Amino acid sequence: MKRKLLPVVLASVMATPAFAEVADKKFYVGVNLATGSGTETATIDDVEYEEDFSAGSTRFALGYVSSPQGRIEVSYGGYSLDFDNADEDEEITSLDFDGYYLFGESDVRGFVTAGLGFTTYEDTAEYTLANEDLSGISFQFGGGVIFAPVDNIELEASLRIKAIGWQQIEVSNGFSSTDVQLATGLTLLGIGGKVLF
């Protein structure tokens, strides 16, 4: 009886990790709130002009847990830029695609993240020949800590850096035109939460 039962038990034990690994691959939705600062740089005739701002952001995310250490995430975020000399805040929106790598296997885990984004500088159509809001490409990276108080809930604290290069603007006074190149950099401290399913 023992000789017949032993192969069955061994087969069950060996199969369990593979099943558990598949079962652990989950989707999640999340939200992140952040605050920080940044600098906007305008390059005109090879001369750079810089202006600092304070910033806040809200991001909504959908992610896939591809492995215990790996994740893929797509998020949509709004960024509010408060310049000292401006009457109103400037607004940026961004559709981001990021990869995550998590360390450890406990309820508290560190992570690093990096990715690319497609950004829009809202209400800037008047500055473009096509009469469309400025578009740009961003590169973002960061790191932080994830805490899982229960099985399907995660809380997150993070530091993220986002660099945006905008399309070139042509400014004309009616007699001559000048090309202007804009770049925006942000550093943000954020907190957020995720629900896994």
Image: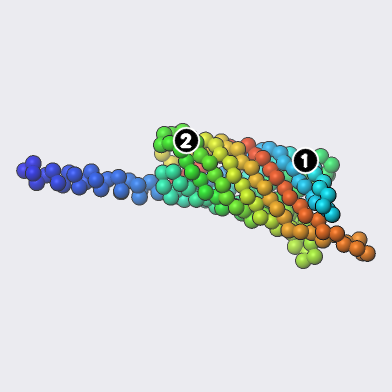
Residue at horizontal 19%, vertical 44%?
Answer: 10
Q: Amino acid at mark 2?
A: Arg
Quadrant of image for the N terminus: top left
Q: Position of residue 12 (x, y in %)?
A: 21, 46
Nearer to the camera, 43 or 83:
43
Point out the residue furthest to the front here.
46
- Per the image, the residue denoted by label 2 is 109
Q: Which mark is residue 61?
A: none
Query: Who's the residue at 80% across and 51% down the image?
Result: 43
Quick one: label 2, few (<14), some, or many (20+) residues within 10 Å?
some
User: Does residue 182 appear in the picture of this structure?
Assistant: yes
Residue carrying label 1: 52
Q: Residue furthest bottom?
A: 130
Residue pictured at 72% horizontal, 55% vertical: 166
Quarter occupied by residue 85? top right
Count of picture labels: 2
Q: Locate residue 50 relative to residue 154 in the image: left or right.
A: right
Q: Are marks 2 and 1 in contact (CB under 8 Å)?
A: no
Mark 2–mark 1 Cα distance, whole angstroms, equals 33 Å
